[in-house]
Image: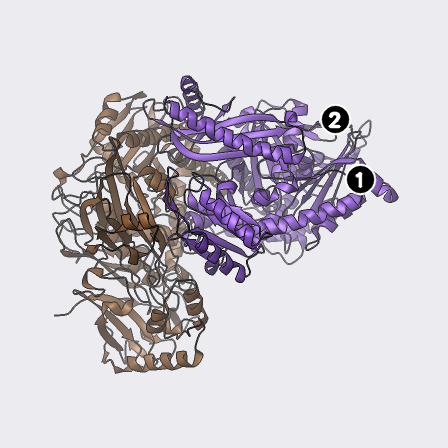
Amino acid sequence: MDRIGVDIGGTFTDVVWIDSNGSVRFDKSFSTPGVLYEGVLEGIKYLSSEEDAFEDRLKDVERFAHGTTVSTNALIERKGAKVGLLTTAGFEDTLLIGRATLSRTGGLPINQAMDFTFTQAPSPLVDRSLIRGIDERVTLSGEVLISPTPDRIRQEVLYLLECGIESLAVVFLWSFRNSAHELLVREITNEIAPALPISLSSEIAPHIGEFERMVSTVANAYVAPLSNQYLSELGEHLRLQGFAHTLHVMTATGGSILPSEVDNKAVSLINSGPVGGLIAARYLGEGLGWKNLITADMGGTSFDVGVIVNDKFEIEENPFLAHGLPSKLPAVKIVTIGAGGGSVAWTDGHRLYVGPESAGSDPGPACYSRGGQRPTVTDALVTLGILHPKRFFAGRRELDSEAALNSIKTFIAAPLGLDPYDAADGIYKVVTAKMADLIRKASIEQGNDPRTFNLCAFGGAAGSHAALLMEQLGISSVIIPYAASVFSAMGISLSDILYSAGKAFPLAVEPTESFSFEVAGTFRELISQVEASISASGIEREKFIFSFELDIRYKGQINSVTVQWDRPTLKQDQIPLVKEAFEKVYERRFGVGSTHKSAPLELIGVRLYAISPLVRPELSPVPSPAEWSENETRLVYSKDKGWYPITVVPFNKMPSELELAGPAVIERGDTTIWIPPNFAAVRDRYANVIISCKKDPK
Amino acid sequence: MKIDPITFEVLKHRLWQINDEQATAIKTISASPIVVEGNDFNVGLFTSDGRLVTSGFGSTVHVGTMGTAIEGIISQAGPIGEGDIWMTNDPFIGALHQNDVVVASPVYVAGAMVLWTANVLHHPDVGGIDEGSFCINARNLYQEPPRYLLKIVDRGEWSQSVERTFVTNSRLPDQVALDLRAQVASINVAQARLVDLIEDVGWPTVESVMSQSIEVAEAQLRDRLLAIPDGIFTGIAYMDGDRVGSERLSKVTVTLTKERDHLYFDYTGSDQQLDAAVNCTEAACWAGTAVPIYSFLYGGEIDWNDSLRKCMSVTAPLGTVVNARFPAPVSISTVGFRWLVTVAACQAVAKMLAGSPKYKDRANMSWNVSSHCINIFGEQNGKRVGALLSDHRAGGAAGRPFADGHSFAGNVTSFSASLGNIEDTEWKLPVIYLFRRQLPDSGGAGRWRGGLTAESALMPYGVESLVYKVTNTAGTDQTNALGLWGGFPGAGSQTSIVRNSSIAECIADGRALAEISNWGGELVHLPSKADGTLYMGDILRFYPPGGGGWGDPLDREEELVLKDFKNGVVTSEFAGKLYGVVLTKSGDIDLDMTKELRDSMRRERQQFKVVSWPLLDRYNMLENSDDLVVTPIGAYGEINRAGQLRCRKCGTIWFGSGAVGVRQSIGPLSLAGPWRALRWNGDSQRFSLSTLICPTCSTIIHVGEELKRE
């Protein structure tokens, strides 16, 4: 069976095609805004080797998985649907008031957030005039204090329809404890406007905390119509071209869903693309026997880190959908800072800063000669000789090394009184140290020692920083994958069908009947939700593996610890077991003695996952030369060693399974891989490059 | 040992990251919304003598206090050893008030003490006469929470007895126990990483990076100060009511003299200390003064550390509300006079920044000027429950020189002090909110409008009664929510109670709960410090302050006023009264009427008599600005070499040789809008609104709140 993974980004559309023999082909082409599916079809056509047999080839494709930025872009660019919002009267301003600062500075890079005066709350997703209150009230126990009248609901819905809304969001206080009022709104609205998409907060994000629930629900209403339209267009075109199966869509939770689920899950497509990278990394890790992996996606502007512990992704409970928009939609955790090839180096005469501002690709680094004056990391790498001016991105962009040097002289070396080459080395070191510190943060803060991890590095800047990160973090091996330039698309093609459901509401952990009853009831509710999705998907129930999680905290804490649990119940006699598991995870993070045995525990939420694992493809080896050709050398500079010669190897001249000792660079089309002294690299049979450290890691 | 800039940057970032990890640990372990949502904590790394090297991004008011507390521990705790962790909440040692527990521990290398790690966190209750420990009923220090200086970990051994002593004095023992664990665990986390780093690169290198961090930040700060013209800038903030039953008016005044690269803050003129817990200590006065400098001038670019001590001096006369003599009560300090020190310092700093061509956009005259703290305690199912409401973080901030002010701004001490969700509050406390909504017309009018505040209403639910403790810094009379350069003050923070409402009938009949007209009952407005009992059927209604405006409201674009009207930010009544914008019934601007109204408002301003420049603020040209003929000051002024302060619009000289002066109008405070002095039907008996007007172009160039002249 063939499988295709597609990742549409703002600039590029990446396609990966793995055929039944396990051979991998991939393509990167420009996205086609407005008619995004055309770019997708172009990419696929390009990859189907015989032009005329395209339709036949597509018939062989059993799996077509898709990561799309349609939803992300609609949100960021505020180009989503015109949404109407009904909420509990008295709380119509919840979106505007937000959480005070969390909704203004949250989701910003820390140095921007700290700039008190200049932060700005993001523009709202719903016009204030389209937010209407309904007189209704439910209490925390789910008891109804005030029932809404159908007449009032009808009147408000009609008003909003008259205003031209394209999508309706309904968010009542405590609706996740009692959803009757939200369901009533849907029932009445369906009578008036059967085609109007409706997002209910009790379904989209059944979690305590009305602001985040409202953000999640409104964002869903905002992006669902566009996402649906796009997916049905794409599905239709694929069918016309001969594709006979169902399209799968990647979500930020780490798996795929079917387009029929998108009404209620459109919001989970937001920020789903980068998760593909973690899936692909996990896949490669499985082949290498690496269970603990740190992923680092290093591009021109940002550095994104993910952590895989024992084959499992870490989950962020309250991720930001975008600046100022915190959600209650658990997503695979990826942390990011502004650091990459385009990061601008600057000084105030006292300190050397690198980033977070990026020169982007236009005007780009000084060495692009496109009007950029200020030095960037790329300029430093050209100056140091690590990047060859004529072989950058397979020679697609010639770099002006003199412009790079001049820019470093003018903006960094002169004001700080440094030698320009030392300044270039400094820029390289400072940005790499920031990357290493982010990896430390992502791993150590969760109780994971980076020395027990391997690193999977991809993206254009991966090659120049990977080995240095190993050295700074004491990591023993790095893999720079063959398909690094389209790594998310690769992961998307390998993603499992994943249904998840969760409910979050604090419940005191007590050895009582009613506690066990409540937990079992909640799980039953979630299981029936997920089973409904499964039966709609047409995949047999038996193909799904269920797993369960409990989020536990000390009473009153805001953050919780996730405990893996093996069943959808929690009986009285199991409470000590759960407590033990909680304390174990807790002490791993905060040290022995940090637990407070007498403090009461709270169950803050339960979650279940149903995964239908796909058969993992067996990849076929990528051909390589049998032995080394004569290698060239060139000089690179470092502050400690001065100018010294290194070996230069074009990737396609690199035989597999033979060690290349540093200092050396491997010039691959997508990235230039720097192998410092004391490091060595091997190209494996699948054309991945694996770097290892030849001296004892720290 | 001089470290090269690259090694410095690499290791400094590492130190920052380690300290940040300390903060993350606290936020994760703490069970207190004050910490996790309110960000009322901070963490730091210190030299062996207690100099702050790097602070976390918690509250900027805590940046200055941890080091003072370490100095206090060093001088008063007796022998200190490796593996010790100390805790103190003594305001006369360095804590802002008794709720703030500083936990500090030294790090040793080869038997020698080399550095300290410390953190500080606001505990929800540490005892004392009033629930929540803001002792609005205390008259002396001994009615306040105990003050500790204790060793919680002795040479690596956790002290059960110390923990017990601390915890048992709290009304919320489980919460403070976890908070204390959070503080100790985070110290352990930071120290483990520091030991690794020191092993890695050697202590001499780390030591050099630490001392250079302070030096480099100092150099960066001096550069910034030199880009600001010298001058004299004043600030004043009033407190209306200092304890339950006392409505005394007291004040803090500050004069900031800025000379080259040094700031001299002088609080001479502030009132004598009070027999009320609102006083602040000298350390708290310093910390409060530092806030606008860290928040607006350091921002995210300079490390928040002791570099400021080299460039800032504070004079606070002993025995006043800003430097209370032991044993004055101080448990409300942080939301009492410490808060008002920050309010007054922010005013002086805003005026100063407004004259800097480079940093003028950072001028911010008022930012949540009253901490409208309400503690709610009660008993539910035999268990004590209690918490500080978070609604006070919804106050507004001043209009900025380039845009409207932040609505629901949080605090000027923290860029991440967040408002809690209604549902989370209802989960923790037996209350039901009837509404939380933006308060129209609460942002001070201006060319750029001040930020709005939000109003909340709640009632007991599931209990017979609840105790409330209102610790509103000030603002039930005057607002303190000042604007700058013609901007009007925003709403003053207020608390009201509707007694014996008919809310039960509303519920029974299914009538709208959020409609105030449905409530019935008797409306009572409370003074700034008040306590009592809320019974079933009583409704608590309250809001923190709005922000002041920037620039004359008649200069605001009509379109922006219309947009505000459509978004429920400004009512049509005050669109007319304050902005001179006439809106039609259908919600559009009547352009002709608007022009007419604005013209007539300007003409009316001509009636007031001209006086000589009455303000004490003095501006100068920027030094070394040979290319400049004049330096623009604020929205409308400019100063030249001759020291003439002139109108940028029309050239009229307001101050200096050949000055014409300015027109001054003294009117009721209610001219600035609704939502002030509710206890006196919206107008103050003690304060008036003073307005200065350019005699030629009729632009309002200053609006202040002044004590009524006899």
Could you tell which of marks 1 and 2 lies nearer the N-terminus?
A: 1
Q: CA distance from mark 1 to mark 2?
A: 20 Å
Left or right relative to A395: residue B281? left
Out of B543 and A233, give the one closest to the viewer: A233
Q: Is residue A51 visible?
A: yes
Residue under circle 2? Answer: A618
Q: Are marks 1 and 2 on the same chain?
A: yes
Q: Is residue A525 above or below residue B139?
A: above
Out of A427 and B689, give the one closest to the viewer: B689
x then y, percent, for residue B561? 41, 69
Please give the letter of the chain rendered in purple.
A
Q: Quadrant of the N terminus of chain B?
A: top left
* Quadrant of the rendered image containing residue A284: top right
Q: Which element is circle 1 on?
A: helix
Q: Is residue B198 visible?
A: no
Residue under circle 1? Answer: A58
Q: Chain of mark 2?
A: A
x then y, percent, for residue A203? 51, 41
Q: Quadrant of the C terminus of chain B?
A: bottom left
The residue located at (61%, 51%) in the rendering is A225
Dot 2: within a 10 Å radius of its alpha carbon, few (fewer than 14), some, or many (20 or more) residues? few
Give the colour chain B carries in the figure.
brown
Q: Chain of mark 1?
A: A
Q: In front of the other: label 1 or label 2?
A: 1
The residue located at (20%, 42%) in the rendering is B331
Q: Residue furthest top?
A: A573
Total tally of numbered discs in the picture: 2
Dot 1: within a 10 Å radius of its alpha carbon, few (fewer than 14), some, or many (20 or more) residues? many
Indicate the amino acid at tag 2. Answer: Glu
